[in-house]
Structures are given as structure tokens and as C-alpha cells.
Amino acid sequence: MSSLRIETETLEIPFRDPFRIARDMSGEVAVTVVAEVSSAADRERGLRGTGEGFPDTYYGETTDTMAAVMPLLLEAVEPFEPSLGGTLRDTRVALTSASEAMDAAIRHHGAAKCAVDIALHDLAARRLGVPVHELLGLSPDIPPTDFSIGIDTPDLVGQRAARAARFPALKVKVGGPSDLQVLEAVRAVYRGPIRVDANTAWQPEQAVAVLPELERLGVELIEQPFPAHRLDQLGWLQERSRLPIVADESCVAFEDLEGLVGVVQGVNVKLAKCGGVGPAKRMLERARELGFRTFLGCMEETSVGIAASAAVASLADWVDLDGCLLLASDPFEGLELDDDCRWMLSRGPGLGVRRRVPKAPRPA
């Protein structure tokens, strides 16, 4: 019988504002899965590792697929559990081996692997009494995050941009019926860099025609304008663009990096795509070796997923870790932004986040 136990919870959390993207216009509720992993000995000590995975049907994942593969993943990582919390070196080796074992057990399923991998890193760091970024050997000094605004009317997007003016950059979702008007509305109320993300919705002629306007409006980068498999179109646009083209849907896992060399200037790494903290670290490091500019993104996650992403953010040139800020309520606390919109990494063990305790009702 396995000494590790996993407990999962599916959370359905409304967005603060509707958050629509070109390939998913629902935009009302975020659905994410939180997992807790522990051994019997951990539970006796009051220790648990918390992780999160955000299933995206675009990548073939749902809450049901996550529930189906998690027992298989737990079985795969079981042999490495005794080394988690030994020496720092042994723990790092065990975490890498656990990630490789999950990949060997089943392909894809990045969100399910992500939830388990984050939980294992949190658990190991708690056993060692160190923050996750220290467990990874990474710096706590990270770039500030931008803030994302979903597709909507120019007036509403402009209002949301004005509210988010404290952030050093805004990421604006495009691919709707009035992209240029939306960007004009943002520029009217915001002076900083604008990052545009089309989520595969543009056509090549449309994209190249709008390049001069994007430059005029102070756009900093263009993320995934074309379908994931159309690397030829991405490369064609990058040849004609002074702005960096950043691959997102075309860049899911480590093995996608080599094929993007000479195609785009940047890649977007997300924990829920590639399988967690450890895979994201390795992917970001390899992307830098290959000469890419690195973008660290997120899904619409709680503070658990964002804290885990922030632990590897020192490896990113651009940071888009605002998922928990898009939610109407975050069931976790402990992760805070500083005055420059940088996430302050935990100085204590693990991720540094905890379940929020509901406030007691006031007496009548």
C-alpha cells in the first residue's frame, strides 16, 4: 500500500470581471484543482504539501481526466518519497526523478502533473524547513508581474486598464471584433508597456497589417497570434516584426523548445502546461540557453499556483502571474505584492500560503 496520500478539491471561483479570451469566450468562472499530498508520518507532524493544477480543455484536460490520472501519478512518485527531506542534494534529485517518473507513466496531462509536482515541492520544502525557491536554488529577486484584461468592449477594457494603472505592464487579450479600438482605449488611460495576446485568433495578413499600429501604441510583444501548429506563420510574422513574437500554445513542454529556434524570439512557460515547478525551471533554463526571451505565464489559479510559479520567476524576462488577482475571492492567503507589483516570496518553509480562515459572522 502507498505511504503517500493525495486529497483533491475542485474549486469553482467567479472572476472579479468577466475574463474572456479568443479561444474561450465563457469567462465567468475559473475551475481549478487543489491537491494535498502527505505521508502518514507527515500527517502525524501536521505537514502537508499543497499543489494546484488548472485543467484546460484546449490541452485535453478536465477535472475528470485529472481525477483519473492522479492515482497513477502518485504511484509513479512513491519510490522517491523517502528521499524528500533528506539532504538538499538528495531532495533535488528525488524531485527530478519523480517528475521523470510521471512523464514515463503517462504522456501529456500537464495540469495533473503540475498539481502533484507542486505539492511534492511544497512538502519537501516544509520537511527541510526552507522556501521552495531556496529548495530550487533560485533567487527571491524576481521581475514584477503585469496585469491581464480579457476581451470586452473598448469602454469596459479602458475602465479596467485605468483601475490597473499601478501595474508596470498590462497584458491585453485580443482577437475580438475591435482590437485596435480596445488598444486605443487602453493607451488613453495607461502609459506603460502593453502586451497583446491573441490566443491563436489572428490571420497572417491581419497581423502584418496591424504591426505599425501596434508599434505606435507602444505594444511590447505579441503573444501567439496564430494556431499552435502553424510555426511557419509564426516565423513569417517574426521576420516582418520588430516586436518579439512569443509562443504560448505552440510551446507546451520542454521538447517543444528546439522546434521554435529561429521561429520566434520568446517563449511562454506555464507550470500547468509543462507539469509543475521542476519542469518549469528546467524549461526556462533551457530556453535561455537556446537564446529565447523568457515569459513566465499562468492560468487563472489561486495563490497556490501563483506562489509556485513565482518561485521560478527569477528565470523570466517577463512575468504574467496575476491569476489569483483575477478571481473574485482567493481561498488562500500569504502571498502578497510589494509596491512595485513583485510577488514577495516566502521566507518560511514551503510556498508560504495557507487556507484562508473564514471570518466568523458578527453577532446579531
Image (tube, grey):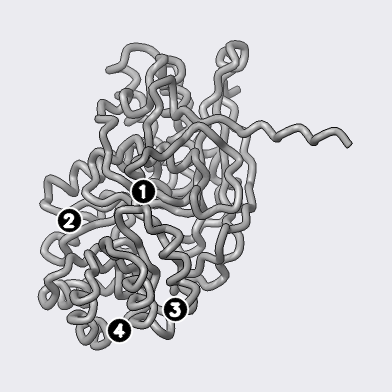
Q: Which residue is mark 4?
A: 203
Badge 1 amino acid = Cys
Query: Are the residues flagged by discs 4 and 3 in contact, CB closer than 8 Å?
Result: no
**Could you tell me how far apart the alpha carbons at marks 4 and 3 are, in whole angstroms?**
21 Å
Image position of 197 with respect to 297: above or below: below
Give me the residue at 32% from left, 31% from top: 96
Q: Earlier in the sequence, mark 4 or mark 1?
A: 4
Q: Earlier in the sequence, mark 4 or mark 3?
A: 3
Query: Are the residues flagged by discs 1 and 2 in contact, CB closer than 8 Å?
Result: no
Badge 2 amino acid = Glu
Q: Nearer the viewer, mark 4 or mark 3?
A: 3
**Which image quadrant for residue 338?**
top left
Query: Are the residues flagged by discs 4 and 2 in contact, CB closer than 8 Å?
Result: no
Q: Nearer the viewer, mark 3 or mark 1?
A: 3
Kind of element beneath mark 3: helix
Label 1 crowding class (10 Å Cα cut-off): few <14, some 14-19, many 20+?
many
Q: Which residue is mark 1?
A: 274
Nearest the eye: 359 or 227: 359
